[in-house]
Image (cartoon, rainbow, N blue to C red):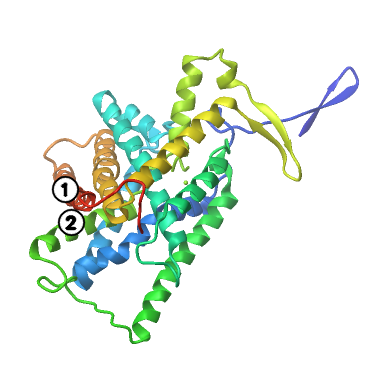
Amino acid sequence: MATMPVNGQSFALDIVKTDDDGRLKRDGNLMSASAHIITAVIGSGVLSLAWAMAQLGWIAGPISLLIFSFITWFNSCLLADCYRFPGPLGGTRTYTYMGAVKAHLGGIKYTLCGISQYTNLVGTSIGYTITASISMAEGHDAECHASTNMFMIIFGIVQVMMSQLPNFHELVGLSTLAAIMSFAYSLIGIGLSIAAIAGGNDVKTSLTGTVVGVDVTSTEKAWNCFQAIGNIAFAYTYSSILVEIQVYCQPIFKLVEDSCRKKWPESGFIANEHPVDIPFCGVFHVNSFRLLWRTAYVIASSVMAMTFPFFNSVLGFIGAISFWPLTLYFPVQMYISQARIRRFTFTWTWLTILTVACLIVSLAAAAACVQGLIMQLRNFEPFKSVS
């Protein structure tokens, strides 16, 4: 706040601080960024890691975790450097993952990035709905195959309300709370595992995972191991929201709403905000289009979750198809373009080998998850989901 004298009188002026790109000055810091990232990484994918470890065993399991964590960290650093164009320090900011790809690569790669990113975000919406409903259905008195439809509906109703928040990325407190909850349920999982072993229950562990001929056939063992890799990939992938820094549906909302505003700029249904005074909370602005579109999206994702409630297969498939393009291919290609790395140099060669190797693993994991879905669909009745 500042004052400016005019004809002997002083008038108050609001000084809006802006960044070098003319937008509102960012007030994020290391703590808020860490909260966003922790919330994204320690998400629902963590809940599938126990099953993945059971398939891979105590040798391949931890090694896979370490490999995927290193790949995710390394390529997240590359993606962060590509946040500005043409250089990582003094270039123009890009505000979305697609925007970064468009600036550095352009053309067909920009389109493919959009398809990959938003397919992943839609799939993640469905995956989180399945995860939340299963978590709510669990308990000491819960049946092994309890229906989760009611819990999906409850979760969907909550998400309808949460989705109406227009500036979700500014709610640092909510991300901090979510980060604490992420650590909490991870620790709960560890505690329950220790309690099961300490209690003398019939708990089997193995260096090589499930035993062929005892737990599974050799074919099932192979498929399950690749599906486990897909689950691990899903647990680590967060590149699709690294640039936007928004928990997972908000980039989808922004894409549709910005596109509609651009196409129909004169539409009051799309553009007008209606203030609503909420007691003890202040004024909340309601937009008719936002209310209708976001509600419809949440309902659609909830219905899809009730239709295909296969936790491990769904999460593994999402991880398999999204890990390679979003975590590997596009960050590497943008870095090569930005750093002007020539073909067949040492750096280009080992980055290419890494990319191709991960592509092969991702394809195998995706195939295993599809096979798992096919097996589960054989005796499946829609809208009679079980946890």
Dot 2 alpha-carbon crowd within 10 angstroms: few under 14, some 14 to 19, many 20 or more: many
Give, as a three-letter code, the residue at label 2: Phe
Dot 1 alpha-carbon crowd within 10 angstroms: few under 14, some 14 to 19, many 20 or more: some
Q: Secondary structure at mark 1?
A: helix
In the rendered view, does 157 fall on the left or right side of 62?
Answer: right
Q: Is residue 251 above or below residue 261?
A: below
The residue under the point 47% across, 60% down is 136
Q: Earlier in the sequence, mark 1 or mark 2?
A: 2
Q: Is residue 152 above or below residue 289?
A: below
Quarter assignment of residue 201:
bottom left
In the rendered view, does 172 fall on the left or right side of 298?
Answer: right
Are the residues flagged by discs 1 and 2 in contact, CB closer than 8 Å?
yes
In the rendered view, does 278 fall on the left or right side of 241?
Answer: right
Q: Secondary structure at mark 2?
A: helix
Residue 384 placement (x, y as % from top left):
35, 51
> Real-space Cα distance between discs 1 and 2?
8 Å
Of residues 101 and 61, the one drawn nearer to the viewer in this rendering: 61
Of residues 332 and 200, the one drawn nearer to the viewer in this rendering: 200
Residue 194 placement (x, y as % from top left):
38, 79
Residue occupied by mark 2: 226
Residue 13 placement (x, y as % from top left):
77, 28
Q: Is residue 241 above or below residue 23?
A: below
Query: Quarter of the image containing the N terminus?
Result: top right
Give, as a three-letter code, the residue at label 1: Ala
Residue occupied by mark 1: 367
The residue under the point 41% across, 58% down is 134
Query: Quarter of the image containing the C terminus?
Result: bottom left
Does the image show residue 73? Answer: no
Q: Residue furthest top?
A: 266
The residue under the point 16% across, 43% down is 352
Q: Is residue 367 above or below residue 18?
A: below
